[in-house]
Image: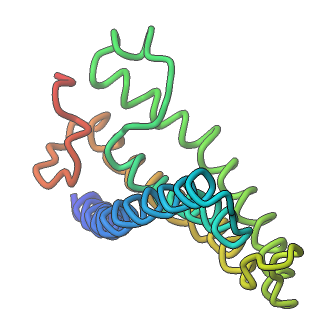
């Protein structure tokens, strides 16, 4: 049982990291709402708009999506069709999650990390900025969030895999970070 307790500690640490990042991202959402509000007021009240503001909106949205993906997985809030899954027992759901991680999540996310790292590195190497006058000069920052966000997502997948492995093996888990196992019994 030593290896399982070590794996559970690893899962707890991964969960804690994505929990903190999720809290940070929630504040960025408020900032995004303020930026969109200002853009709308400027556009309709003063008949003007700025390229910087419009680009900032999609940069913030991209940041929220990418950096919040691990947090969303932590709380099992990703979109899926639950027609069959919701009717399965806890152990059967754990098996579906294990197989899903091995066949889809890990390979797919690893491919995205690999390809986006090359893409991101090229952008950082040339300090890529917006091609539009008045745009954001540091476009490479948001491109750097692509592999980083998927790395966080990958690690949260490892945590999810560990938690579901515990369910399949019948190992009790008292330190679950999220509420994602609530009501599954």
Who is closer to the viewer here, 39 or 97? 39
Residue 139: name its quadrant.
bottom right
Q: Residue at 28% of width from left, 43% of height from top?
A: 166
Q: Residue at 26% of width from left, 63% of height from top?
A: 12
How many dots with numbers?
0
The x and y percentages for residue 104 are 64, 39
Residue 66: name its quadrant.
bottom right
The x and y percentages for residue 155 are 47, 62
Q: How is the image coloured?
A: rainbow
Residue 138: name its quadrant.
bottom right
The answer to whether residue 6 is visible is no
Who is closer to the viewer here, 66 or 132? 132
Q: Residue at 63% of width from left, 55% of height from top?
A: 43
The x and y percentages for residue 124 are 78, 86
Q: Residue at 86% of width from left, 73% of height from top?
A: 132
Quadrant where the C terminus sits is top left
Who is closer to the viewer here, 140 or 113? 140
- Residue sitting farthest toward the front: 46
State whether residue 116 is above or below residue 69: below
Quadrant where the N terminus sits is bottom left
The answer to whether residue 37 is visible is yes
The x and y percentages for residue 101 are 54, 42
């Amino acid at each position: 049982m030593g290896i399982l307790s070590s794996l559970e500690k690893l899962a707890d640490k991964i969960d804690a990291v994505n929990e903190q990042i999720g809290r940070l991202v929630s504040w960025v959402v408020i900032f995004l709402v303020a930026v969109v509000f200002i853009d709308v007021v400027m556009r309709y009240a003063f008949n003007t708009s700025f390229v910087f503001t419009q680009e900032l909106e999609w940069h913030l949205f991209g940041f929220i999506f990418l950096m919040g993906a691990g947090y969303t997985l932590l709380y099992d809030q990703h979109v899926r069709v639950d027609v069959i899954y919701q009717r399965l027992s806890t152990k059967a759901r754990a098996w579906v999650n294990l197989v899903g991680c091995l066949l889809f999540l890990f390979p797919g996310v690893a491919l995205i990390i690999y390809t986006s790292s090359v893409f991101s590195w090229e952008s950082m190497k040339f300090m890529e900025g917006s091609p539009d006058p008045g745009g954001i000069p540091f476009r490479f920052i948001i491109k750097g969030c692509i592999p980083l966000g998927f790395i966080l997502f990958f690690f949260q997948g490892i945590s999810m895999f560990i938690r579901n492995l515990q369910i399949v093996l019948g190992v009790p888990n008292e330190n679950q970070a999220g509420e994602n196992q609530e009501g599954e019994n």
